[in-house]
Amino acid sequence: MSKTDPAMNAIGVLALELADGQSPTQAALTADQSGELAERIGRDLAKLVPQASALDLVFAAAHFDPAEVLRPGWPIHRRLEELQMRAPGRSQGPRLLAFGADANGDVPLPFQADDTLKGGGLRVLPFLLTGTDAATTAAVSDALETVLLAEGMAHADTALLAQRAFGARVEHARYFTVNDLAAMMSMQYDNQGLAVLWPLIETAIMAPGQDEWLDAAPEPLLRYTQGEARMALFDPAGWCTYYAHGRNDCEQLKGVYEQYLMRQRQMAAVLEAHGVPVLFVHCEAGQDARALLER
């Protein structure tokens, strides 16, 4: 699967692993806190990749579920890029741009995390590194891909500042590229029994112009295409037919069918968390379900 375009920006996150199921008390940091944390992030990254100090560091001092970052088009990082392009001083050397809560303590809309995805033990703070020299940006992006996964622990004072500012105990704080984050999420979904769904999510994020199928009985039938996931919605008779259950068995398989519907809802929720809309396509017995999803 192709990765993000290194010639554009080096994009990543500061990942905070929280202790004991805690949730941060602060959704976003004040301007002073944002600037202080951004300075430490910039220092950490420059120690890992010295060329990073030649680029703008643009940082969202707000925490998100990883699925909110891993979405088609990288919307949070694109917003950071837009803010970087509008900020003054582009020709005056590398800048440190940090965005958090406004003067009233409110979180601007682009950096408001989804309330329905709160509560996870891992929260991520997006950043990007970019500059006017594409070659330098590309070199930094490549270097981060090489070093962060193995050596990307945040310095202790960075982790302590994040812990104090967000109001939740941080067990580990480390830097990931978005490709590292995607690989980690793939492993998590594997552990949660959702490995079969990851290829669709990865296609939507990394190669949204491509098609991807999930057609592996007894899993739900899914097709990702044109920016959406199309999921076959079977009635009991259609489900029995498609999954080759004998007609005489269908009455005894009501519980299995209910489990299948729960699996559909679970998959739809995961896809939507990643910003992939789900379209349910009704499929009745005797209809060609794959052909219906190809329309």
Image: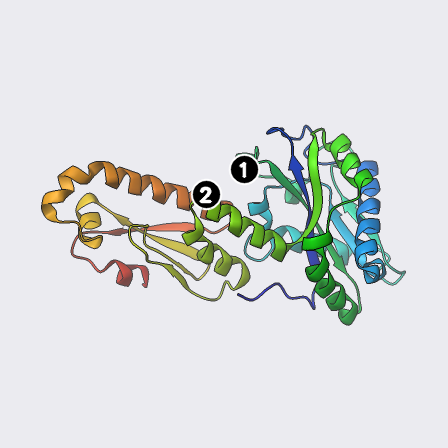
The extreme left residue here reads 248
| Residue highlighted by disc 2 | 192
Q: Is residue 55 visible?
A: yes
Left or right? Give the position of 1 relative to 101: left
Please state which amino acid type lies under the numbered disc 1.
Answer: Leu
- Up-down: is 124 above or below 45? above
Residue 21: x and y, percent?
59, 29
Give the residue at x 79% y 53%.
45
Q: Nearer the viewer, residue 190 or 280?
A: 190
Mark 2: amino acid? Gln
Precedes in sequence: disc 2 or disc 1: 1
* Front label number (2 vs 1): 2
Residue 162 against residue 181 in the figure, above or below? above
User: Of all residues shown, which one is farthest toward the bottom?
Assistant: 135
Please, what secondary structure does the residue beneath circle 1 have?
helix
Q: Quadrant of residue 168?
A: top right
Q: Quadrant of the C terminus?
A: bottom left
Label 2 secondary element: loop
The disc at residue 117 is: 1
Please state if 215 lies on the left or on the right of 5 as rendered. Answer: left
Q: What is the x, y in percent for residue 271?
A: 46, 48
Q: Which numbered disc covers residue 64?
A: none
What residue is at 79 percent from the left and 63 percent from the top?
131
Q: Position of residue 252 (x, y in %)?
A: 15, 38
